[in-house]
Amino acid sequence: MTKFPKKIDLKPGRPLYIGSVQKLYNVPGHTDLIISETSSGGSVFDVGTIFSIEGSDTGRAAFRHLVFQELQNPKSWKKLEGKLAGKGKILQKDRSGLINKVLAGFIKSGAPTHHVGMVECNTGKVYAKGFPPTFSNLTLIKKYKVEKPVLKKFMGRHFYDYEKYHHIDRNVIPLEYIVRLGVTTGSSILRKYDRLGDADKKAYLNELGVNSLSPWTRFDPPIVDLTTKYEPEDRNISPQEASMISGVDGDTFSKSLIMAILGAYMLQQIFDGMGLTLWDLKWEIARDGKKLLFVDTIDTDSVRVTFNMRRKDRSYFVHFNKQAMRDYYKIMHPDWIAAVNEAKKLAAQTGKPFTDVLKEGQAEKRYAGTPVVDKVFLDIQTEKFLMIQSYIHNNTQDLKKEAKRIANRELDYYLKSGKIKEYERLNSV
């Protein structure tokens, strides 16, 4: 078993990576480790950091630490097994026995992850289990290579070469595994489905393995939707193409799909304690020989989770994740959303980063400028993070009343803004 430091140097130097919500640093004296520093900044539609939610830096890191502890805990998997067994449940439907096999391994030893622990900001002490007295925005993780595909151009067109992934190891598989336990109005699969003709719709449903597709319905079992990870824009791909570019053999690729599904069930088990419903989430998975590990972040930026409630004879689904911010921009600033979408279309044709296309259009006044988020709305999002942190401090409390209070605040915001009808079209039935 690998031994990790109980304390680290908190002067790591310049960042290895600066993203929209986190920075990554080397760990002095430990070439196989990285420090992740989560920020309070936020990003939507891949445009970079354009807003900030107070408390989201420690909130995201604390939730990530909670999730990875649960993934690593054999007792949590044993508890989950009871929910997945029985008549009509996924373990009974698993004719191949592969899900049972992977789950049995997790029950015995926990799920492998890259997560080492939360790092106390003042002392550098590493908490592999439990939390420091005050939540930190620093986490310690094992390092896995990030290799990007090579852009190839010909006759004014382009494609990406993934050949190198078949010859490397200890790397992040170049895919995003989107596990869908249901479909919301914001789901990309629903947008794609709505654009298709009748014949193509039937073929797409067969590809997904479902009989129908409509907003706010659940899948049983969940489906895994796959996209590229390291191209300028995430691109939806079939399981066949995903298997080819992953760089792993077929059995290992199958295991990665099962891991993603089981990990989603574990997340729902966590959210059950907050009275929230999980709809979808993104996983990244790394390879280390034949071993697969859950890696990267898992927080409110990478899940879609709602509090479901009735109000005036309608069912509302209020997001407790980044989808709330996406919907805010769609409802309150549709001109900016139109600019983002047009920039993405132009970028897809040229291979140029769409953020460059967007900035050029804004500089020339062809595109709407990036809007400033109303502080009142940001305060509501802060309350969501505080509620989740409250659960982490004490997971025995009933948070349904608090979740409902926050959800009502968000609905009232759109009502007072004269935008409740637009909100209802996205998030109610």
Image (tube, rainbow, N blue to C red):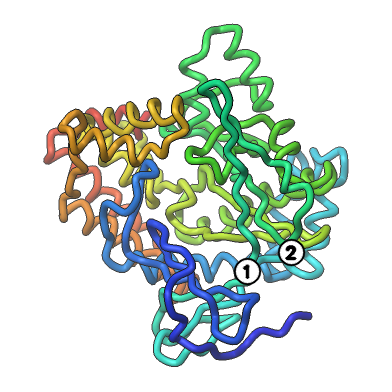
Whole-percent x, y for residue 378 in the image: 23, 55
State the residue in front, 327 or 356.
356
Whole-percent x, y for residue 356 in the image: 33, 40
- At mark 2, the secondary structure is helix
The 10 Å Cα crowd at callout 2, few under 14, some 14 to 19, many 20 or more, is: some
Horizontal relation, residue 371 to residue 144: left or right: left
State the residue in front, 419 or 378.
378
The kind of residue on which mark 2 rests is Lys
Residue depicted at 55% across the width and 76% down the height: 140
Where 261 falls versus 95 (above or below)? below
Q: Are marks 2 and 1 in contact (CB under 8 Å)?
A: no
Which circle, 2 or 1, is nearer the viewer?
1
Residue 15, picture quadrant: bottom left
State the residue in front, 230 or 74.
230
Residue depicted at 62% across the width and 69% down the height: 143
Q: Quadrant of the N terminus?
A: bottom right
Q: Let me know if residue 398 appears in the view.
A: no
The 10 Å Cα crowd at callout 1, few under 14, some 14 to 19, many 20 or more, is: some
Q: Residue furthest right?
A: 96
The kind of residue on which mark 1 rests is Lys
Cα distance between the residues tagged 2 and 1:
29 Å
State the residue position of label 1: 143
Whole-percent x, y for residue 197 in the image: 53, 8
- At mark 1, the secondary structure is loop
Residue depicted at 85% across the width and 45% down the height: 251
Horizontal relation, residue 270 to residue 186: left or right: right
Q: Quadrant of the C terminus?
A: top left
State the residue in front, 176 or 356.
356
Whole-percent x, y for residue 165 in the image: 72, 48
State the residue position of label 2: 78
Where 20 falls versus 14 (above or below)? above
Q: How many marks?
A: 2
